[in-house]
Image (cartoon, helix red, strand yellow):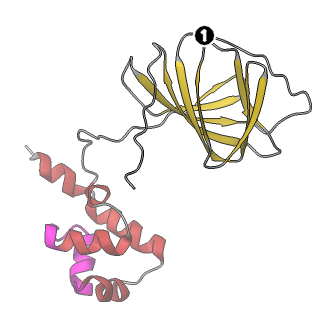
């Protein structure tokens, strides 16, 4: 019966060869980058030599890949959020938080302003803060209208009728924090 580490290491050779060939590197050139001999590299790629950590680290660095990719390590507790965009009403929304309740974070991409710029105001419970990452956003809040460029932010009570969209011919990319129960985003002033 094979040990789990044997399973992980079994595919290293073909992955190393594929990475080297994709870069168009020769064994001699890779040997110069890693400090390993061309003979050792050949035996690793052919599966005749079991790789060690001391060999894999310079290979991962030379190929510009994480060590986990070289050994096809099984997934572990990954703290990163794997973004899954949702398309709704012509918008692309990317949830940035995974837990239910509390303040939720989203990246929202508003499509370029169209010929029929419909501004159907909506109102609902909550509090929202948004920051324009790129483009220009058109923000209608009650009877007032604002245009916000990259680097500008707004905060408002969502019970006031409102609408957000792109103000120009380019999409507007916005980072949004929304609290359904009225939680507010608190920003501490910088110390002077």
- 12 up-or-down from 185: above or below: below
Q: How crowded is mark 1: few (under 14 residues within 10 Å), some or many (20 or more)?
A: few
Q: In which quarter of the image is the N terminus?
A: top left
- Which quadrant of the structure image shows residue 81? top left
Q: Which residue is drawn at 9% across and 47% down?
A: 3
Q: Is residue 154 left or right of residue 102?
A: right
* Residue 93 locus on image (x, y percent): 59, 31
Q: Nearer the viewer, residue 188 or 103?
A: 188
* Residue 20 locus on image (x, y percent): 40, 73
Boundaries of the magenta span: 35-54
Q: Which residue is drawn at 22% across and 69% down?
A: 56
- Which quadrant of the structure image shows residue 173? top right
Q: In this view, does 124 lie to the left or right of 22?
A: right
Q: In which quarter of the image is the C terminus?
A: bottom left
Q: In this view, does 163 lie to the left or right of 11?
A: right
Q: Which residue lies furthest to the right in this view?
A: 115
**Total label count?**
1
Q: Which of 148 and 117 is in front in this view?
A: 148
- Which quadrant of the structure image shows residue 156? top right
- 32 up-or-down from 3: above or below: below
* Residue 133 locus on image (x, y percent): 60, 46
Residue 115 seen by the camera: yes
Q: Residue at x 23, y 41 (%)?
A: 76
Q: Which of 31 and 138 is in front in this view?
A: 138
Q: Circle 1 is placed at which residue position?
A: 124
């Amino acid at each position: 019966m094979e040990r789990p580490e044997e399973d992980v290491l079994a595919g290293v050779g073909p992955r190393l060869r594929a990475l080297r060939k994709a870069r168009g590197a020769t064994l001699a050139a890779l040997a110069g980058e890693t400090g390993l001999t061309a003979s050792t590299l050949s035996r690793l790629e052919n599966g005749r030599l079991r790789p060690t950590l001391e060999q894999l680290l310079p290979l991962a660095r030379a190929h510009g890949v994480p060590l986990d990719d070289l050994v096809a390590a099984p997934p572990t507790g990954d703290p990163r959020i794997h973004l899954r965009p949702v398309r709704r009403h012509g918008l692309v929304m990317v949830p940035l938080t995974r837990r239910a309740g509390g303040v939720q974070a989203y990246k929202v991409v508003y499509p370029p302003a169209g010929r029929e710029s419909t501004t159907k105001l909506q109102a609902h419970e909550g509090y929202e803060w948004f920051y324009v990452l790129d483009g220009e956003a058109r923000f209608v809040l009650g009877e007032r209208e604002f245009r916000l460029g990259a680097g500008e932010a707004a905060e408002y009570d969502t019970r006031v009728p409102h609408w957000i969209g792109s103000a120009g011919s380019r999409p507007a990319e916005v980072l949004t924090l929304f609290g359904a129960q009225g939680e507010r985003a608190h920003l501490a002033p910088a110390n002077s």
